[in-house]
Image (cartoon, rainbow, N blue to C red):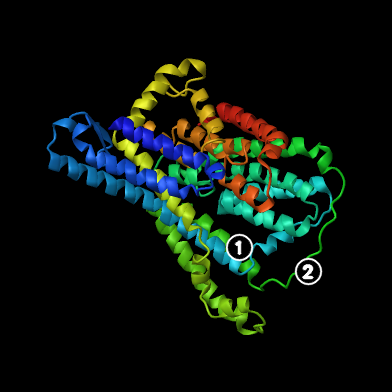
Amino acid sequence: MEAAIILVFVMGYLAITLEHSIKIDKLIPALVMMAICWALIALGLESFPQWFDSGKHALLENFGALGHEDKMHLMEETLLHHLGKTAEILVFLLGAMTIVEIIDYFDGFATIKGFIKTKKKTKILWIFSVLAFILSAIIDNLTATIVLISILQKIVKDRNIRIWYAGLIIIAANAGGAWSPIGDVTTTMLWIGKKVTTGHLIGYLFIPSLLCMIVPSLIASFLPVFKGELNIVEDTEKTKSKFSATMLYLGLGAIIFVPIFKVITHLPPYVGMMLSLGVVATFAEIYSSSKFSMTEFDNEESELHAHHSPVHQSLSKIELPSILFFLGILMAVAALESLGILFGFADTLRETMPQLGTELHEGGVSDLVVLLLGVGSAVIDNVPLVAASLGMFSEPIDHELWHFIAYSAGTGGSMLIIGSAAGVVAMGMEKIDFFWYLRKISWLALAGFLVGAAAFMVTRTLF
């Protein structure tokens, strides 16, 4: 039965990886894979020799000796435990997504456009790279990419130049998301899973991530495409809301407050995110009536805004397919963890790979394994890779392994445009060709990734 479960997982994994080729949204194989894996576990419960008890964080070698009722009870408890842990991540993401949508409701991100005062291509490159690096650490790399490419489309007329900027934005956004507990889904998973703390994550990864952004941007600055000046498109759109700047800074401040709230109260991060959402939503409700009280409703969109709560409007724009994908993939990985399959794979890695790289500690995991995980995240979605790592390794909180995994999984995806959520969304927004990105941008991403990894190996000795 274990072989059947592994086969289902591999097939589902392939379907997720080949999403763009088979034209099936990745949430579908993720949900099907999760349901079938747990169904096979329930049907073959009597045949499994061991079980990982999540409550006790221990592998039960005597699982086969238990009665059927005890096994069913343990399976149900394990399923509920993993659902609870997964729900923590999903509720956290829902809160963050809603705050971002509320900011957008008030045209808050239009404020960022005011920072761009130059026409020099090189300076604009650095402005967008730095903005992507900073914004992704606060509002996550996916959202930062959407925001900055939307701004880019409004000011850069030539698409052939714009896609170059988009490629560097992807690299910078993924680098910025790696050093923040709220900057990337994978770092959020490690943070909520009590594998890393905010202070150590920033301490370990800020410099490597910064170099991962700086090196590609610096190299790109000398490329011919970034020489000269841009023909900036004049903005002819309607005046932004008078509350846009206020809501931008309030929303970003509320998200930044979440790790502080966790440090003070020791409560799970989603509690702080719900508090932040409540505060932002309160101001949104107050400002929304003012926003439209003096507006003449000359189109249907204005009428829609006027008669709906900004919170309701923002919730209607949340990407539920992404939420369901995370549910499916995390619960499917939990199935493999519960059977002890991931632990066996981790032991195999420890036995076969340490001699090929610098060991993180005696009997630990080779640097090469983590670097390969980073390269793998360019091909395979980094969420299941990190989810599998959580089940494979048992190192304590803030061990350097977890921070290196956060860096590798977060930044390695930049090497292919399909390797990260930021890349996929940029691909959709600008219709960037896979092979164009491979020829023009991938080598820049690889250079940044390797320099950052080398910096990590040097700086980790300080902690």
Note whether 159 is above or below 459 in the view shown.
below
Residue extending furthest front? 22
Q: How crowded is mark 1: few (under 14 residues within 10 Å), some or many (20 or more)?
A: some
| Mark 1 → mark 2, Cα distance in angstroms | 25 Å
Q: Position of residue 190 (x, y in %)?
A: 44, 42
Report the disc number at residue 236. 2
The residue shown at (59%, 80%) is: 303
| Label 1 secondary element | helix
- Judged from the image, the secondary structure of the residue bearing numbered disc 2 is loop
Q: Which of 1 and 318 is in front in this view?
A: 1
Is residue 244 found left or right of 81 in the rendered image?
right
Q: Tell me the residue that label 1 is attached to.
A: 249
Rendered location of residue 302, percent (x, y): 62, 78
User: At x 52% / y 77%, what residue is drawn?
Assistant: 308
Amino acid type of the residue that numbered disc 1 sits on in the rendered structure? Tyr
Asked if marks 1 and 2 touch (Cβ < 8 Å), the reply is: no
Q: Position of residue 323 (x, y in %)?
A: 45, 53
> Image check: 257 left or right of 48?
right
Looking at marks 1 and 2 on the same chain, the residue that comes earlier in the sequence is marked by 2
* Quadrant including the N terminus: top left
Total numbered circles: 2
Which quarter of the figure has residue 9?
A: top left
Residue 70 sits in quarter: top left
Q: Which of marks 1 and 2 is in front?
A: 2
Q: In this view, does 24 lie above or below 49?
A: below
Is residue 358 at all visible to an observer of this figure? yes
Question: For residue 84, which numbered disc appears in the image?
Answer: none
Q: For this rendering, which residue is in front, 211 or 14?
A: 14
Which amino acid type is marked by label 2?
Thr
Percent position of residue 352, x then y: 43, 17
From the viewer's perspective, is 4 left or right of 261? left
